[in-house]
Amino acid sequence: MGGFDKTIENVESIDDARYGASSHTSGARGGHDIYLRQMAKNGVMLVGPVIGGNDDSLSLRTDLTEILKAVDEHPVNWKRDVDAYVEEYGIQVPPDDTVDPPDIQDWPKGESPDSLNLVEAGIKTIIWSTGFKYDFDWIKLPITGEHNYPVQLRGVTDYPGLYFMGLQWMYGSKSAQFIGVGEDAEYVSGHVARLFG
C-alpha cells in the first residue's frame, strides 16, 4: 500500500503525520491490537490527561471521550484503506472476521472525572503512559521551528556539522523506525562525506 514509503512531499499535513494517532499493537498472543475501550470493560480505569495534582489527588482533563474517538478512528480508517487496496488490486485474502467498532453514537462513553483521590479510589498502581515531547533546548542554536521540531531536511540543518537522525517524519513515515532510519542515515552520511571528505 506504500504507507511506509510516504514522504513529507506527499502528505496533506506534516503536522497531522507527525503528531496524529498511529497504530498501536502488542506482541501478546502473536500480536493483537490494544483496544482501550475493551481494556476499560476488563477493569482498567481510563482517565483524561493529568493536568495537576497535590498530596493524594490528581486533577484531570474531562475530554476522554474525544481522545478515545480520535484514537479509535485511526484503525478503522486504516482497515478501510487496506480493504480498498485489496479490492482495487484483486488480491485474494481470507474473509475478514474482525468487526469495526460501533458507530460513534453507539460507542461506550469515556467519561473522566475532573479529579481523582487515589487513596479513596483504592488505586495502588498507575500506568503512566504519557509519551514524550522533543526538547532541544540544550542545543544553543536557533534550530527549531513550530512545535519545537528541528528545521532540517532529511536530518541536514543549516548549520554545517549539525545533523538529526531518528525523528518522527524527518523525511518519511519510517524515519523514526528501524525499517527506515537507515535510509535517512545513508543520506546524512553522504552529506557528511561531501562536506568533510
Image: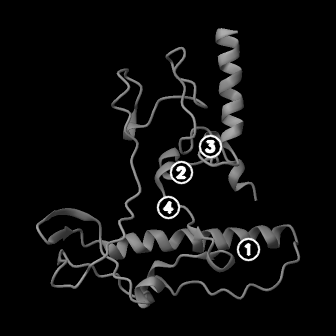
Residue on which the image places disc 2: 17
Q: CA distance from mark 3 to mark 2?
A: 12 Å
Residue on which the image places disc 1: 83
- Residues 178 and 123: in front is 123
**Left or right placement of residue 54 versus residue 186 in this view:** left
Residue on which the image places disc 3: 175
- What's under tag 2, amino acid-wise? Ala
- Determine the image quadrant of residue 193: top right
Q: Point out the tag, 1 or 2, that comes first from the N-terminus.
A: 2
- What's under tag 4, amino acid-wise? Ala
How packed mark 3 is, by other alpha carbons closer than 10 Å (few <14, some 14-19, many 20 or more), is many
Image location (x, y in percent) of residue 19: 46, 52
**Left or right placement of residue 34 versus residue 78 in this view:** left
**Left or right placement of residue 8 versus residue 197 in this view:** left
Q: Nearer the viewer, mark 4 or mark 1?
A: 4
Q: Residue at x 53, y 76 (%)?
A: 34
Above or below, comparing residue 180 to residue 92 in the picture:
above
Q: Point out the tag, 3 or 2, that comes first from the N-terminus.
A: 2
Describe the element under mark 3 as helix, strand or loop: loop
- What's under tag 1, amino acid-wise? Asp
Image location (x, y in percent) of residue 52: 17, 61
